[in-house]
Image (tube, rainbow, N blue to C red):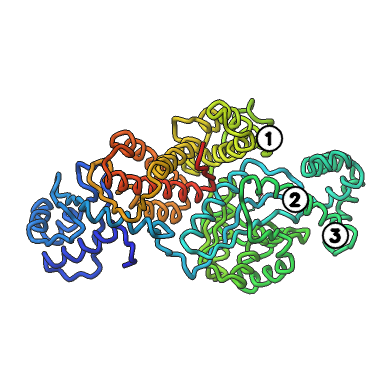
Amino acid sequence: MPALATFEERLSVWTTATMKLVFGFENSEVHLGVAPTNNDKFGDYQCNAAMELARTLKKAPRQIAQEFVDKAELPDFVEKIDIAGPGFINFTLSNAALSEHIEALEKDAFLGVEQSGQGKTVVIDYSSPNVAKPMHIGHIRSTVIGNAIDRLYRFLGYNVIADNHLGDWGTQFGLMMVGYRSFLDEDALKASPVEELERVYVASYNKSKEDDTWRDKAKAELVKLQQGDAENRALWETFIELSIKEFNTIYDRLDVKFDLYRGESFYNDRLPIMIKSLEDKGLAKESDGALIVDLEEDGMPICIVRKSDGGYNYATTDLATVEARIEEFNPERIVYVTDERQQLHFNQFFTIADKLGFDANLVHVWFGLMRLPEATFSTREGNVIKLASLLDEAEDRALEMVKSSSPDMPEDQQKDLAKAIGIGAIKYTDLSQNPQSLVTFTWEKALNMEGNSGPYLQYAYARISSVSDKHQALYPDIDLTKYSINIEHQIERRLAIKLSRFPAAIQIAADNYRPNILADYLYDLAQIYSSFYQNVPFLKAEKGVRESRIRLCRSAAATLKQGLNLLGIETRERI
Ligand code: ARG
């Protein structure tokens, strides 16, 4: 067991071994789990093994539990064991073990989180907007959710490759080129490049609807681009460069970093080879001039891998990309983060990848759309919002809050704080809900100081930090490490138990690709801390007790800070 094994792990191992001993069964398959209780009147952990074993042992669960309790020799970290209801076995941890555990967590750089990802690589494909088009709400959610998953996996010790799979190839570039050469407004391009590129594209597209020569011209330019014509190639590169530059300003504001920006075009050379392997393996067949993979057996519609005009499809590129990623990185898994509308696409190409025998665990993490109040954001085409103005507004609103709560703070500090709070509020709104549910964004909720929000947690963190700063100011000569943590009070126990469950929250959030599990954990932690703070004296407590509480308080601060950081949310010591 790892050095800092959780109480849950230690109890599960002990319960399994002891059950075998007490009842003399040998089945090595049996693993009896324990789970945290949700109310401490049932102790700290609960085991339902007596119910599970009733059949095997041919005894009533209550009787099994009783026999177990009578015969078992308690491990030293358990204070009390008792039986509840039909045969639940409840464990109460000893205060000494809890105190010792918190001291150990305090010293651990990972706060007790096991480095379960060590030696494993995971590719996370997220954000992935399309060149020359503004990011839509789906890309924004993909950026925020994908980045939280990225941070969680890195924290677990995985070698994470964050890959921004830009949509930088496709038939739209023919129309873009002719549009750019005819309709471009240089000033608009300077002011807002991606917006202008899109405008040019839309104008060109509309013209192509009515004008056949225009359409043919666009097609000819596309062919030239595909054949590597230097001029068209250079223009295409300009589109990419301008787009990435603008996307990067957003990533910078969101503190999101990618290891790779490999667009779809990166895999172009592999596409004919991919088609050939699909044909060689008998997976693809001709249909009306196109090449398709029939997925009827798998309950899905056919997947076109080469169109009748010879062009390749989204799925073809994704298959080639999987192959390239396996060759280069040998990842344990590849995670894709997109909105729910792409579920069929991922199901299809995952199934084909499987048929091709690709050896990687492919995971599609999808999320629902976020509903934005029409009046709040400038919207175009339904769900396209200008992200930059959303972030500006968040920072402006946060600045108002900071100015009224800390009027005496120097202005640059107010601004810095407003930035952390505004961006944190947006991210937390996105991350604190089950990604698959429909989220309605409101400023009231995002910036609510009393409720489950980013700013609430940032304030909680600052309040916790200030307690330990006050202690430092009052007792500058006291070396906290010379005092031990002694958990006694009920509310201290609650806080300590919550802190000891941080590793489980991280692991569950990562395993399920659900940052909201971590968000829930942090919100609970902040609430428990605040009742701890209100119910026991800190600075006024007697010497020793005071230092123990300050240490506990610092552990809570460290955990909150680390947890928020994993959600990509910044903290400040002073608010
Ligand atoms: N560019 C795509 C879009 O905007 C998302 C790409 C997601 N990643 C992938 N490997 N398919 O819809």
What crowding class fits label 1: few (fewer than 14 Cα within 10 Å), some (14-19), or many (20 or more)?
few
Q: Residue at x 49, y 30 (%)?
A: 448
Q: Residue at x 61, y 67 (%)?
A: 325
- What distance separates the C-alpha of mark 2 from that of mark 1? 17 Å
* Type of amino acid at the residue the image marks with label 3: Arg
Can residue 84 be seen in the rendering of this structure?
yes
Residue at image mark 3: 233
In front of the other: label 3 or label 2? 2
Disc number for residue 245: 2
- What distance separates the C-alpha of mark 3 from that of mark 2? 18 Å
Mark 2 / mark 1, whichever is N-terminal: 2
Farthest residue to the front: give it: 477
Q: Quarter-wise, where is residue 67 in the image?
A: bottom left
Q: Residue 261's spot in the image, x, y percent?
A: 68, 59
Q: Nearer the viewer, residue 375 or 187?
A: 187
Q: Quarter-wise, where is residue 553 in the image?
A: top left
Q: Residue 264's spot in the image, x, y percent?
A: 70, 59
Q: Residue 4's spot in the image, x, y percent?
A: 33, 62
What crowding class fits label 2: few (fewer than 14 Cα within 10 Å), some (14-19), or many (20 or more)?
few
What crowding class fits label 3: few (fewer than 14 Cα within 10 Å), some (14-19), or many (20 or more)?
some
* Type of amino acid at the residue the image marks with label 1: Ser
Mark 3 / mark 2, whichever is N-terminal: 3
Give the answer, above or below, for where 194 lies relative to 264. above
